[in-house]
Image (spheres, rainbow, N blue to C red):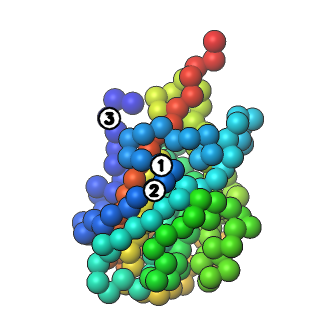
Amino acid sequence: MSQLHDPYSALPPVPAFRLRSADIADGETLGVAQTSAIFGGPGRDRSPHLAWDGHPPGTASFAVTCFDPDALTVSGFWHWALYDLPASVTELPAGAGDADGDVTSAGVRMLANDAGRRGYLGAAPPPGEAPHRYMFVVHALDVPTLGVALDATPAWLGFRLVAHALGRARLSPVFGLPAPS
């Protein structure tokens, strides 16, 4: 890719806060657990551990998303969309994005990703492409609930996130597969 597009740079600016993880790091290659087996690879489709702090005062809830802006589509690819996370929750364990994970029992809602599966879908770029970026973002929001229906798309959730954003924290690991021999 000759020019890397950052979709968040076009949004209204909001303060940044700190996001950290025991499983992923900015610019580093994703581990097998955070990649997908959807095309027969060894991945485990396991969302990473995420923890954050320093969010703006007045934060009433959080949303967590994972987006691949490098997917060969005009709209990128949403891997994960979790929202209505209470403001008292500032850490998610690895696997919180599992479709049957216990995070949803706390009133948290999870949309289907762009593959139509509810929960986290790991990285699965086509072999031979330059490594893709996976933008894990925690959004600090000014409302306790977004009123987004479970049959909505992650793009619709994105509109609501922009309208209620107080701050964002980001980590962008990468992942690519070698070209077949």
Question: 76 or 32, which is in the foreground?
Answer: 32
- Residue 51 is situated, as x and y percent measured from the top left of the image, at 45, 65
Q: Amino acid at mark 3?
A: Gln
Q: Position of residue 171 (x, y in %)?
A: 40, 53
Mark 3 neighbour class, 10 Å CA radius: few under 14, some 14 to 19, many 20 or more: few
What is the spatial separation of the Cα atoms under label 2 and label 3, in whole angstroms?
Answer: 27 Å
Residue beneath label 1, please? 24
- Residue 169 position within the rendered picture, expressed as x and y whole percent measured from the top left: 35, 63
The answer to which image quadrant residue 113 occupies is: bottom right
Residue 64 in sight here = yes
Kind of residue indicated by mark 2: Ser
Furthest residue toward top? 181
Verify CB contact (< 8 Å) between mark 3 and mark 1.
no
Q: Is residue 113 visible?
A: no
Mark 2 or mark 3, earlier in chain: 3
For residue 21, which numbered disc appears in the image? 2
- Which mark, residue 3? 3
Quadrant of the rendering where the N terminus is positioned: top left
The answer to whether the residue labelled 2 contacts the one labelled 1, judged by CB atoms less than 8 Å apart, is: yes
